[in-house]
Image: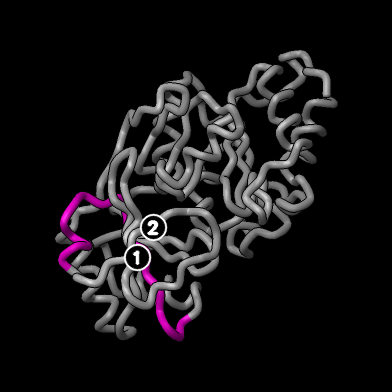
Amino acid sequence: MSAAPLSSFPYRLVATDLDGTLLRPDETVSRRTRDALAAATAAGAAHIVVTGRSVPWTRHILDDLGYEGLAVCGQGAQVYHAGEHRLLTSLTLDRQLAGLALAKIEAEVGPLAIAASRDGLDGEVLIGPGYRVQEGPLPYVPYSDPAELWSAPLNKLYVQHPELDDDALASAAREAVGSLVDVVMAGPGIVELLPLGLSKATGLSLAARRLGVKAAETIAFGDMPNDIPMFAWAQHGVAMANAHDDLKAVAHEITASNEADGIAVVLEQLLAR
């Protein structure tokens, strides 16, 4: 695809979620989407990945894309420079507050299965007893002693319930924890506890400031409720056809699914103007 003149592309920043958005179900990025993103960057826009995954679970995808810019990881907790393999910012979850939040949630809904993302470039993901791990190549470390969970700084906790679905668990958790932590649903089977006030918008705004780009110059793509703050921050929010209904309700536009190159569909239309 030929690059469009700078004046024809209306955005200076293209922000894309990963899972369910940029990535197909097999965790690859199609040639069509790669070409559309390359054309957008040739037209003067920056592409920035904004994902719930922590850096260790994101880095291999960025490397495969030949991505050398900034990425927002860990639901906004981490701003990562892919070209330099360096963390620029990193926010951790207060472990005392997290423990209290877990106790309050379990008092309402019963025992939870718990996992945790440790802070840092090489932070491990710890998986506790009963936690259902999604199939795929992402590495994790099982733990059995609860003390291991709190032995190092964390970006976030993951919680699962044996009976409640994701929406019900997220709703019950929000009601139980009040103002201790934030609760987001980031994907199927993924309900997370985050530092209060943290969101993808937090990290994206920090990264955009470093790039000298404003919210009014940003188009964002996503598929899950954790993308809602990013859509609220950006000038234009595009939900995938496979997106959660809560995100579709606040989107400015709905495109094709991640399997059908929904990002490319929109970018190609913008580039052709």
User: What color scheme is it?
Assistant: one colour
Circle 1: residue type = Ile
Residue 39, position in %: x, y? 74, 23
Q: Secondary structure at mark 1?
A: strand
Q: Residue at x 25, y 47 (%)?
A: 92
Q: Dividing the image into 4 quarters, which one contains the C terminus?
A: top right
Cα separation, mark 1 vs mark 2, equals: 7 Å
Q: Secondary structure at mark 2?
A: loop
Residue on which disc 1 sits = 127
Q: Dividing the image into 4 quarters, which one contains the N terminus?
A: top right
Residue 44, position in %: x, y? 65, 17
In terms of depth relative to the viewer, which is nearer, 28 or 174?
28
Q: Are marks 1 and 2 in contact (CB under 8 Å)?
A: yes
Question: Could you tell me if residue 136 is visible in this image?
Answer: yes
Q: Is residue 191 above or below residue 229?
A: below
Image: magenta residue range: 147-164
Q: Is residue 7 above or below residue 123?
A: above
Residue 213, position in %: x, y? 51, 22
- Left or right, 7 with respect to 60, comes to right
Label ID, residue 140: 2
Q: Residue at x 45, y 86 (%)?
A: 163
Q: Residues within 10 Å of mark 1 (few under 14, many from 20)?
A: many
Quarter occupied by residue 109: bottom left
Quarter occupied by residue 267: top right
Label ID, residue 89: none
Residue 132 within the segment the image draws in magenta:
no
Q: Residue at x 30, y 50 (%)?
A: 155
Circle 2: residue type = Tyr
